[in-house]
Amino acid sequence: MRTWLLPMAFGFATGILSAWGVGGGTLLLLCMTLFLGVEQREAQAINLLFFLPTAGISLLFHAKNGYLDGPVWRRAALPGAAASLLAALLSLRWDPRLLRIPFGLFLLYAGASLLWKAWREEGKQ
């Protein structure tokens, strides 16, 4: 029972946080790599499998509600997909330990950006 309980609890908790806009996918990656012993590439693949259907459904609802900027979306979709494919192929050739440093720096930057934005908005009030 324990082999599935902890992963399910992490998935449930990060899913709720993701619904609140906290970044559940990033938290899920951290939980899988730090607490469940999943290799980073495998954790990223699992995260991507869960992200793609959610992103597709979100895209449909955003389009339905008129939240998509058509010209920007059309210009960004193909280069973004090509860059993602190239990065995925390159990551297969690199040592996973080399990927941890840029990912950790990205997390620090993202967290600092959110804190900076919150601090500036609080100062305006």
Image (cartoon, rainbow, N blue to C red):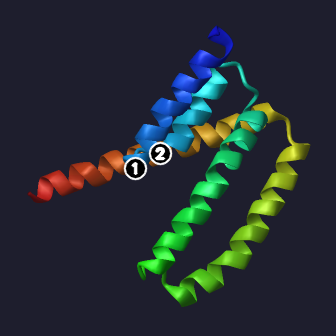
User: What's under tag 2, amino acid-wise?
Assistant: Gly
Percent from the top left, x then y, of residue 16?
Answer: 42, 39
In screen coordinates, is 96 left or right of 58? right
In screen coordinates, is 25 left or right of 4? left
> Which residue ends up furthest to the bottom in the rendered image?
71
76 above or below 49? below
Task: Label 1, secondary structure: give it.
Answer: loop
On the rendered image, what quadrant is the N terminus found in? top right
Nearer to me, 55 or 111: 55
> Which residue ends up furthest to the top in the rendered image?
2
* Residue at 12% across, 59% down: 124
Q: How far apart in space, not on screen, are marks 2 and 1 (Cα)?
A: 6 Å
Q: Quadrant of residue 47?
A: top right
Q: Quadrant of residue 30?
A: top right
* Residue at 70% across, 19% down: 37
Percent from the top left, x then y, of residue 6?
Answer: 58, 17
On the rendered image, what quadrant is the C terminus found in? bottom left
* Residue at 58% across, 56% down: 54
- The numbered dot on residue 23 is 2
User: What's under tag 1, amino acid-wise?
Assistant: Gly
* Residue at 41% across, 78% down: 65
Residue 25 in view (yes/no): yes
Crowd band around label 1 with a 10 angstrom C-alpha radius: few (<14), some (14–19), many (20+):
few
Mark 2 in CB contact with mark 1 (< 8 angstroms):
yes
Q: Which residue is mark 1?
A: 21
Nearer to me, 74 or 9: 9
16 above or below 68? above
Percent from the top left, x then y, of residue 3?
Answer: 68, 13
